[in-house]
Image (cartoon, helix red, strand yellow):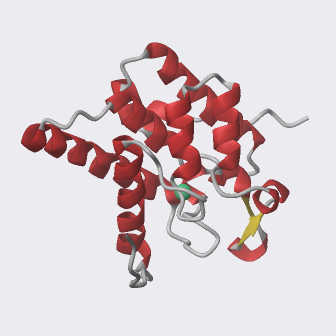
Amino acid sequence: MTDPKPPLDLTSLFPAIEQIADRRLREQVEQVWQALWAQSEWTDIEAVPTSGSIPYPTVPHNRCILDIALAIADAFEHHHRVRVDRDVLIAAAILQDASKVVEYRPGEDGKVERTELGRCYPHAYWAAHLANQHGIRDDVVHIIITHTPQASRFPDSIEGKILYYVDQLDVIAIHGDDWKKSLHITR
Ligand SMILES: [Fe+2]
């Protein structure tokens, strides 16, 4: 019998997790990641790609989103006194892409394949589902499920909007720009 896969060192992976002031939320974030990792067919977290079409690794993508999002929160607070909830921002940033480890699996010849779960559900659904099962607050789950452009709606909160736009900007940095502008009149 093979040994079970060791858990991830989440503090090394995302040091900002230590900045989550609410200890319960911090533990829930860790539990969701470990549950996803236990279900995952990957053995090296650094090998998981940003997506099936973006081979760049997801860990530095995710870390960069977190760093930029925290810098934006600092600037909003410094210049405008707009309050950003750091616990919500950090928890959502660490979890929003976590389900990639179960949406994809390593395939033949270094290729990446979608898993059954990745075919059945939209991106981020499984992380949101587990977050909900682990009792994570609804405003964090809302950001996880709405962070992707494929979601049917935008995130409601300032924390979700920061992460939404930062995620898209970071994809431009690592993969290139395929945004299109469409003009329309609204009233
Ligand atoms: Fe994502």
- Looking at the image, which residue is at 77% across and 68% down? 107
In the rendered view, would you say 84 is above or below 136? below
Q: Residue furthest left?
A: 79
Left or right: 141 in relation to 17: right
Q: Which of the 4 quarters of the picture holds residue 81?
A: top left
Left or right: 31 in relation to 126: left
Q: Nearer the viewer, residue 163 or 154?
A: 154
Residue 82: x, y in percent? 19, 37
- How many numbered discs sit on the rendered protein? 0
Residue 105: x, y in percent? 74, 59
- Looking at the image, which residue is at 42% across and 56% down? 164
Specify the quarter for ligand 1: bottom right
In the rendered view, would you say 81 is above or below 101? above
Residue 46: x, y in percent? 54, 54
Q: Which of the 4 quarters of the picture holds residue 11?
A: top left
Left or right: 100 in relation to 86: right
Residue 64: x, y in percent? 35, 54
Query: Which quadrant would the C terminus be assigned to in this image?
Result: bottom left
Q: Residue furthest front?
A: 187
Viewer can see residue 29: yes
Q: Nearer the viewer, residue 38 or 181?
A: 181
Q: Nearer the viewer, residue 174 or 142?
A: 142
Q: Which of the 4 quarters of the picture holds residue 37?
A: top right
Left or right: 43 in relation to 115: left
Q: Nearer the viewer, residue 187 or 50?
A: 187
- Looking at the image, which residue is at 56% across and 72% down? 55
In the rendered view, would you say 86 is above or below 158? above
